[in-house]
Image (cartoon, grey):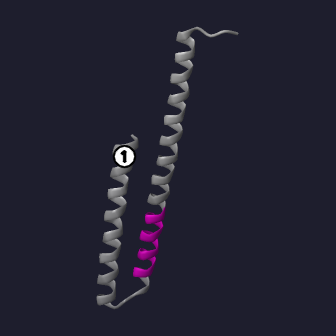
Amino acid sequence: MLQTGFEKTEEELLQERAEVLRHASCALQDALQRLHEIEKDIEAGCATLKRYTREPVKRDLREEIGEQVRRFNEQREYAQLRYY
């Protein structure tokens, strides 16, 4: 079946949209994976924190967990702005 110029252009636009959506989907998946990895680090840090009783060690762990939470929030905001 022969396509008109309009039909061909419309098909090309749809193909481009599909490619953009595929790219965005891959990028979003990567961003979510990074969030998941940071979340696992936070959970591991919290579990470690519960095992220690010495305050200097706990203080260092809290600082490390706080840094991980900051990284998580920055990554979440980035993903939200970029992909929402």
Number of marks: 1
Residue 29, position in %: x, y? 51, 50
Tell me which corner region of the image, top left, top right, bottom left or bottom right, holds residue 61: bottom left
**Residue 44 falls within the magenta-colored stretch:** yes
Q: Residue sitting at 57 percent across and 15 percent down? A: 8
Overall secondary structure of the magenta section: helix
- Foreground of the two, 76 or 13: 13
Q: Decide: is 19 above or below 6.
A: below
- Foreground of the two, 41 or 26: 26
Check disc 1 and report its element: helix, strand or loop.
Answer: helix
Q: Decide: is 9 above or below 71.
A: above
Q: Residue sitting at 70 percent across and 10 percent down? A: 1
In magenta, the rendered stretch is 37-49
Residue 28, position in %: x, y? 47, 47
The residue under label 1 is 80
**Residue 19 falls within the magenta-colored stretch:** no
Q: Of all residues shown, which one is farthest toward the bottom?
A: 54
Viewport quadrant of the C terminus:
top left
Q: Residue sitting at 29 percent across and 83 percent down? A: 59
Pointer 1: residues within 10 angstroms few (<14), some, or many (20+)?
Answer: few
- Foreground of the two, 62 or 70: 70
Residue 32, position in %: x, y? 47, 53
Q: Residue sitting at 42 percent across and 76 percent down? A: 45
Which amino acid, mark 1? Gln
